[in-house]
Image (tube, helix red, strand yellow):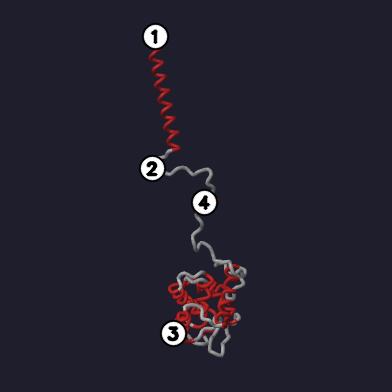
Amino acid sequence: MSQVNFNFQSTFQWAVFVVLIVTYSFLGCYFPKPGSHPARSPLRTEHSEKETNPSPKGSGKKTVPSKIPYGSLVFESSDKLGINPFVLAALIIPESSGRADVESPSGAIGLTQLLLPTARQHQPHVTEEELKDPRINLRIAAKHIAWLTRLVEQHFPNVGLEQKIKLIAAAWNVGWSTVYKARGIPNNDSVRHFCEKVWHYYQLYRFGKIDCHASR
């Protein structure tokens, strides 16, 4: 009888031991220690990871809309200064109709119709002939837009996108001091018409359509 009790007791102890090991292993899978890395959830697919963690900036080439005149140069000049390329692009047709060699009676030159004194604020030794080079013209124009953008953001911090673009366009057209004194877009038909044209092309290049309510 004592031998039977001993065998029963030993068997019971081993059974309890096995149950404890299995239970510990089971709990360890579902409740990992702090700092450990749980196994990948079977519900998290590779596709969902890409959506949650998109590729960082610069991982691919930017697509330049084909409708923008001198698009690659516009984006190249804008990227170097961190400005909105669609603002620079929107100036080209209203200013020069896309003609790089055009010169106005007032002396404005090239794609963005830069005046020589204005251009020399950003590139002191540039010549009139050099301003007919699209690359040089756009590079200097981008510098001027960067300067105007900082002023608009500083003095008109609460305006929406449309008004901001038009303020930059007005300052480009008649000078920052005129816009500052007027505390906005000057009440001048010619200036307002120019601002509307720039906003028109901004929408066309940025959104692919003309929608007055697209970005207010």
Residue located at (51% from left, 71% from top): 84
Disc 4 to disc 3, how far (Cα)? Answer: 51 Å
Q: Sequence order check: which comes first, mark 1 or mark 2?
A: 1
Disc 2 to disc 3, how far (Cα)? Answer: 62 Å
Q: Find residue 62 and report its image quarter.
A: bottom right
Q: Sequence order check: which comes first, mark 1 or mark 3?
A: 1
Residue 180 place in picture, x, y as percent: 45, 79
Residue annotated with mark 1: 1
2 and 3 marks in contact (CB < 8 Å) = no
Residue 34's disc is 2
Q: Amino acid type of disc 4?
A: Glu
Q: Amino acid type of disc 2?
A: Pro
Disc 1 to disc 4, how far (Cα)? Answer: 65 Å
Residue located at (44% from left, 84% from top): 124
Q: In this view, does 176 lie above or below 85?
A: below
Q: Is residue 199 above or below residue 4?
A: below
Q: Find residue 9 and report its image quarter.
A: top left
Residue 1 place in picture, x, y as percent: 39, 9
2 and 4 marks in contact (CB < 8 Å) = no
1 and 4 marks in contact (CB < 8 Å) = no
Q: Amino acid type of disc 3?
A: Pro
Residues packed near mark 3 inside 10 Å, few (<14), some (14 to 19) or many (20 plus): few
Secondary structure under tag 3 reads loop
Residue annotated with mark 4: 49
Secondary structure under tag 2 reads loop
Q: Sequence order check: which comes first, mark 2 or mark 4?
A: 2
Secondary structure under tag 1 reads loop
Residue annotated with mark 3: 124
